[in-house]
Image (spheres, rainbow, N blue to C red):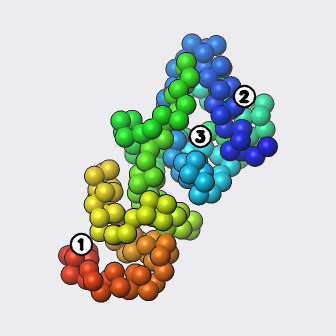
Amino acid sequence: MNFDAKVKEAFNELNKKLEKEGVTLTVICVGGFVLSQYGLRTTKDIDGFFKSTAEIDKAIKTVGDKLGLNTEDELWLNNSVQNLNRSPAEDICDVLYDFSNLKVLMPPLEYIAGMKLKSARGQDIKDVADIIKLLKADDPLSFIENLQTLGFFEIDISLVLEAFGTAYGMSWLEKYYIDNEKAILEMV
């Protein structure tokens, strides 16, 4: 059984541990896990925003050990993403799981695109291109405006154009640039 197939079981087990301890927890999942929920790619861990305590970390480790989800370097559920990003607002997120003591949320794909454009690591532009195709986004400038409504104000337009070029090809991007050169240059 792969990681994605074990996720609901893992969250259910985590809820049982939290319930036993009398602890409640909300996790906002981001990154590759959200992409896997849309069938865009798989992941080996879950990056999330949540308040870490010794008892929560122990419960996460115990569940991961029991289900074989932890790696030597990382727990199956971690909040290291909090060091580099700000958490999405809960009110823009969808509820993935709502157990008695554990709520698991997921922001919209546009938010994930914003995070990936901000970090711009190797896989990130390809992930954004996949998001663009899935959303059938066809206007980079509107895409940037949507990101700004989610709080991403310092997105590099060249990265957005690169992602659109990756999504739809360089001929598409060249035509878009010719048709929208003035607006693009105003945004730079």
- Residue 140 position within the rendered picture, expressed as x and y whole percent measured from the top left: 34, 69
- Residue 134 position within the rendered picture, expressed as x and y whole percent measured from the top left: 49, 60
Going by the numbered disc 1, the residue's amino acid type is Met
Mark 2 burial class by Cα count in 10 Å: few <14, some 14-19, many 20+: some
The Cα–Cα distance between marks 2 and 3, rounded to whole angstroms, is 13 Å
- Residue 163 figure quarter: bottom left
Going by the numbered disc 3, the residue's amino acid type is Asn
Q: Are marks 2 and 3 in contact (CB under 8 Å)?
A: no
- Residue 139 figure quarter: bottom left
Residue 87 seen in render? no
Mark 3 burial class by Cα count in 10 Å: few <14, some 14-19, many 20+: many
> Quick check: 103 above or below 170?
above
Of circles 1 and 2, the one toward us is 1
Q: Earlier in the sequence, mark 2 or mark 3?
A: 2
Q: Which residue is mark 2?
A: 62
Q: Are marks 1 and 2 in contact (CB under 8 Å)?
A: no
At a point 39% along the width and 43% down the height, the residue shown is 88
Q: Which residue is mark 3?
A: 78
The residue nearer to you, when weighing 161 against 172, is 172
Give the quadrant of the N terminus: top right
Q: Which residue is mark 1?
A: 187
- Residue 155 position within the rendered picture, expressed as x and y whole percent measured from the top left: 34, 64
Give the quadrant of the C terminus: bottom left
At a point 65% along the width and 19% down the height, the residue shown is 16
Of circles 3 and 1, the one toward us is 1
